[in-house]
Image (spheres, rainbow, N blue to C red):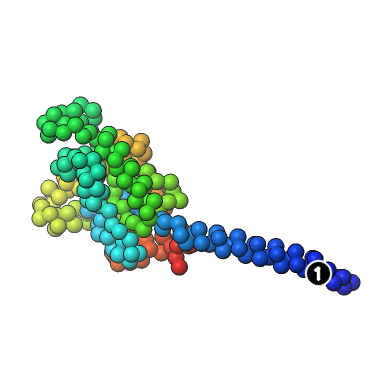
Amino acid sequence: MERAPRSVNEMVEYQVQRWLAEQQKRRQERRILESPAPIVTISREAGALGTTLGRLVAERLGFRLWDQELVQRIAEESGASETLLAAVDEQARNAIEDLLAGILMGDSFTEKEYLAQLMRVVHAIAQHGGAVIIGRGAQFVLPPDAALRVRVVGSLEERVRSVASSRRLSARDARSEVERVDRERLAFIRHHYHQDGADPHAYDLIVNSTAIPLERAVDVVVSAYHAKFPQKSH
């Protein structure tokens, strides 16, 4: 049975509703395109080439890299010296150590104040978008939908060899350095964020730099970024 022809009013109403739906869709697409690009956070084991991977990913995506620049930014905004900030950067200390550092270094800037400034800067970076942040627990500062959270790991033997080569250390000293840095970074996360920095569930992607060549690892991270944020892929 044929449907009766629609009245002029029905056709007009249909076209109006269709036009309104298209306008709503365009507004949503415009909001997505105009919103800041989600960032990438890189957590890394010592000697796993996480910083190098982060730099290459930033270059590939056209993003700004934030590593030591975070410490410099905090120093500029807080008035504290970079030397003092380096003493608390990714290291866990207690209140007594903070007090002694302030007395000995002639500065009252404590680790808690550093962390407060760090979190403020990380949020500011995320609001601007288009950035890769190395370390500092940034994956625990931002909500999951604001960043691709990457952890870079590698075999202890390869990481020791990497540090021994780059720092010109003996294998024994390089191993001690790798273990010390790993321990301090995890302690920093546990002390301030009450999280396990090595927990795989805290990340969207874990890259084993021992198993995957660096250039291929960059491809993997960039592909994961576009897969998580497809609206920012065009």
Image point (29%, 45%), residue name: 136
- Horizontally, residue 194 falls left or right of residue 156, namely right
Rendered location of residue 27, percent (x, y): 55, 60
Seen as rendered, the residue at the extreme right is 1
Asked if residue 16 can be seen in this view, the reply is yes
Element type at marker 1? helix
Task: Please say if 181 is above or below 29.
Answer: above
Number of on-image labels: 1
Side of 175 relative to 149 (left or right): left
Q: Residue at x 66, y 65 (%)?
A: 19
Residue 176 is situated, as x and y percent measured from the top left of the image, at: 16, 45
In the picture provided, is 225 more to the left or to the right than 84? right
Quarter location, residue 111 = top left
Give the image quarter of residue 104.
Answer: top left
Q: What residue is at 22 percent from the left and 45 percent from the top?
A: 76
Which quadrant is the N terminus positioned in? Answer: bottom right
Residue 151 visible in the displayed image: no
Q: Quadrant of the C terminus?
A: bottom left
| Residue hosting label 1 | 8
For label 1, the crowd category at 10 Å Cα-Cα, with few meaning under 14, some 14 to 19 and many 20 or more, is few
> Which of 62/181 is in front?
62
Q: Is residue 2 above or below residue 101?
A: below
Amino acid tagged 1: Val
Percent across and percent down for residue 102 are 16, 31
**Position of residue 190 measured from the top left corner of the image (x, y, whole percent):** 32, 37
The picture quadrant where one finds residue 182 is top left
In depth, the one of 27 and 1 nearer the eye is 27
